[in-house]
Image (cartoon, rainbow, N blue to C red):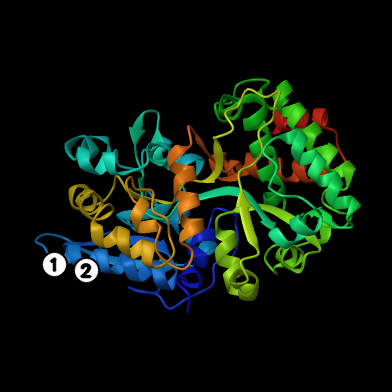
Amino acid sequence: MSPWSRARSALTAGAVALTLTAAAACGTAGPAGAGGGSGELALWTLENEGINAVQQAAVDAFNQGEGADIELSTYVNDPYKAALQTAIGSPNASDIFYNWGGGNLQGYVDAGQVADLTAALDANPEVRDAFLPSVLDVGTIDGQVYGIPMQGVQPVSFFYNKDVFAAAGIAEFPRTWTEFLDVIERLKAAGIQPIALAGSQPWTELMYLEYLLDRVGGPEKFQAIVDGTPGAWSDPAVVTSLQMIRELVDRGAFGTNFAAVNYDNQGSQALLTSGRAAMELMGSWEVTSLNDNFPDFLEAGTLGWADFPAVESGTGNPANIVGNPSNFYSVTSSSSDVDAATRFLMEHMTSDAYVQGMIDVGQVPAIEGLEEEVAVGEFADFNSYVYETVQNAPTFTQSWDQALPADVAQAMLTNLSQVFLGQITPEEFGAAMEASAQ
């Protein structure tokens, strides 16, 4: 089995709300209470065969030392979230828990349920300095670090069918929005749907708003939304971004049936790989999924990838990226041994064995100085692109549906879908979101 195949579930978990498949798990198959017994700490994580093996190896290495031992327990995605919400803050909480950082983590921090790891990183500067700063920032709340990156980076970018571009006479992927709109018209003239969009799942539509707002107004526009600044959802940059989305829909960039297309059953990928559509905006897990479901397409070398275009009139840096910076481990403040749980993170999340283990199962770790390591293997070109993109990004904005509180995120996805369908205007979107965020 390809290492990309083994990594697929963890790459998509939480990031895009896909359902994780149950793979053979390491550790226990269900929850272990805090400590799990005298001198034993519990670590909860998501279930994935390849990644769990790397995690278990780190736990085994830690357990060979003196002091508390760690027991690793695995969950599939939705049951994990439910178990964590129920247990955290109670005597049944785990000592170390997997999370998505950002808004997903902040709620637990605000409730006083997460240990502050800042002092430990100050005492271990080599650990702090090992991480890509833009990724570590997502585990940082109000200037204090509560989450340590523990998996690969997952930026969003465009993927395109090189053969389709060549058949339409398009030599390279457009770098600006004006060029992008021109390419859409050229593809339509060639009888090709420009963009595959799994519009039955609004998280795929959200990527367009995330990037366009960043390109039009810069990351501070979304930060104002996160901060709850009055009027942030109705900011002119938000309205402009939504108008640009409506222009794409009205031009027929997504075809006429995008609302019925699904990502989980590879509907949008089938359009891309068959040549019926030319490109798709998606997270880095796209390559993993294509390798699982359309291996011949990858083997033919037909897949291309490129950055989201710059918006000429915008103020955002074209090198900024959006997506899922990583997943994180945090320590519960109620742990019976916060020091031991913290020591595990300091000793093993940047160790050579752990980092190489993640690379071996298809992850691109959020670690500085891995240019040579990621440039080896079957997907070296793509892994190097991902790594360089993240390393050079001035900002890496977390996917909004993870950065925002769950109720606000759901309202946002519902309203955004209505914008794509022409059921509400960009201005009405802003008004609806201002109301939901109050």
Question: Residue tagged by mark 1?
Answer: 64
Identify the residue shown where x is 61% and y is 44%: 307
How many numbered marks, from 0 up?
2
**CA gap, disc 2 to disc 1?**
6 Å
**Is 174 on the left or on the right of 103, as rendered?**
right
Which residue is at the front of the view, 10 or 153? 153
Identify the residue shown where x is 55% and y is 65%: 288
Question: Residue tagged by mark 2?
Answer: 60
User: Furthest-left residue in view?
Assistant: 66
**Amino acid under disc 1:** Gln
**Is 418 on the left or on the right of 312, as rendered?**
right
**Is 395 on the left or on the right of 427, as rendered?**
left
Whether residues under marks 2 and 1 lie with C-beta atoms below 8 angstroms apart, the answer is yes
- Image location (x, y in percent) of residue 294: 65, 73
Q: Where on the picture, by quarter, is residue 278?
A: bottom right
Describe the element under mark 2 as helix, strand or loop. helix
